[in-house]
Image: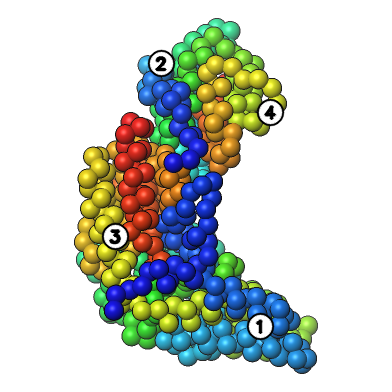
Amino acid sequence: MSFDVAAVRGQFPILSEIIDGLPVHYLDNGASAQTPLAVMDAVRHYETTSRANVLRGVHRLAERATEAYENARARVASFLGVPTMEVVFTGGCTAAINLVAFSYGSLLKPGDRILLSEIEHHSNIVPWQLLRSRSGIELEMLPVTTDGRIDLSALPRFLTPKTKLVSLAHVSNVTGALLDVRAVVEAAKSVGAKVMIDGAQRAPHGPLDLPSLGIDFYAFAGHKAYGPNGIGVLWGRPELMEAMPPFMGGGSMIGRVTLAETTWAPSPRRFEAGTPAIGPAIGLGAACAWMQALDWAGAHDHEMALVQRLMDGLQKIEGTRLFGPASLQNRYPVVSFMLDGVHPHDVAQTLDSFGVAVRAGHHCAQPLMDRFDLDGTTRVSMAPYNDNSDIDALLAGVAHAAKTLR
Amino acid sequence: MSDQLYQERIVALAKAKTGAGKLENPTRTVRRDNPLCGDRVILDIRLDGQGRIAELGHQVRGCLLCQASASALSAVAVGRDAAGVAELRHDAERALGREPGDTHEPFDAFAPVASHKSRQECVLLPLEALKDALS
Ligand SMILES: Cc1ncc(COP(=O)(O)O)c(C=O)c1O
């Protein structure tokens, strides 16, 4: 049976909004995805039947809230293919990376090296730069190929016994390129380095099997994966997490507090100081369950057909150039392009007047833009609920921009 | 298609590229970046003996609005001192609906940007750069 886009779209009320007479052609999923009714229902259910703080109270609402919160953890764990108690809720993907940079980073010594790449989102660069200024570690950057992939052939050159961690994007938020994680892990292991993967752009495209990847840390954001804002996830290998000091201090993360000394609770509590984002965590649990129920083989074929339709259409508009892999292999539905003579912001603004939402600019990847001397790109990022009409509206808008703005 | 931000006058200003390019012997060169969108303006100015702009050259790496604004500015900046440039800034602010009052050529062309708050900095960037250059 072919993938039923209409049925998926029906679960996202915002896609049938009409704004200023225009339909919603939402192609900015890489920035934030839309959220299905199942997620809104789960959050509403918590707020209307179970709202209380977690882990502390003995009353019935507190019991309900705690159960819902821990169920959400189980759902996220199932989505990632890991044991429930290995999942840490964070404030987002950025917060998860900062947690590792702080807590794992505090175990590193001056002269230790961390390997990143030129394709990384600022949130997988800046936390490491902050660590560098705190602790004197060194940062190195893997180069990027002209088709927008991290150049793994450079790995042997950069990996040394001083390399303690390699932290890379699973899927690029600019080019959609998928990283060959196993190749990275194999190379990193040969020098004893750990591997962290920024899954912000991969998680929205279906369940994962983290153990099979052999990595040490994985981070993603709830709002890009059809969940609420203000919630994200860190998975870490238990023996590493147990060795790491807390990121923040407060309630819930302690073993025992005396004025002289405090002992830490085991992970995940150690890394969830204070009252967590309970409603958003429950929403993210529902989003993970929603994703797990989707036919991803069908969804992926559908997304790739949209990518092909987009690439074919862009090629017919004079002066467009793709930045990223030209093929459908090892990629996800994030496509960046330039229109010669028209600035990306002007492309995006024109598209808005066609009801099409895209992102334009540097995509929080300025080092990548500098490397390829780009003013920025226009980025089309898709989700399973996008359809041909979204792509066709976009192509009409780009053609209009090409005709009127240069 | 809905509201048109890129009306003919704005597009014409951008395409005119008035004042685009470097100056041979600038008195001052300033660079201004918009960290949010990455737009960048480099301005060269040559001043006369009284602190008035004798010549101006701009290099814009940015969107159409930023280019149009630099072009508009170049068309009317010559002969102005810092106070005169501040007047232009007020004119632009009025066109964008951020200050009350009437606006004049050429900045009145930016009135369509009044309803696009996120794009107003693009229009103001060249004016910011010129203010820096004169301070
Ligand atoms: C690849 C990548 N990493 C990290 C992030 C940061 O996510 P958040 O801002 O939700 O924490 C993003 C978001 O744009 C991203 O695309």
> Which residue position holds label 4?
B99
* Front position among marks 1 and 2: 1
Task: Compute the Cα span from label 1 to label 4.
Answer: 51 Å
What is the chain letter for disc 3?
Answer: A
Q: Amino acid at mark 1?
A: Met
Q: Are callouts 4 and 3 both on one chain?
A: no
**Point 66% across, 83% down: residue:** A253
Under 8 Å from ligand 1: the CB of mark 4?
no
Decide: is A325 above or below A178.
above
Task: Compute the Cα span from label 2 to label 4.
Answer: 36 Å
Q: Report which quarter residue A202 is drawn in.
A: bottom left
- Tell which circle, 2 or 4, labels the residue nearer the N-terminal end: 2
What is the chain letter for disc 2?
Answer: B
Q: Amino acid at mark 2?
A: Asn
* Front position among marks 1 and 4: 4
The secondary element bearing badge 1 is classed as loop
The secondary element bearing badge 2 is classed as loop
The one nearer the camera, A175 or A27, is A27
The secondary element bearing badge 4 is classed as loop
- 10 Å neighbourhood of mark 1: few (<14), some, or many (≥20)? many
What is the chain letter for disc 4?
Answer: B
Q: What mark, if any, has residue A253 been given in the picture?
A: 1
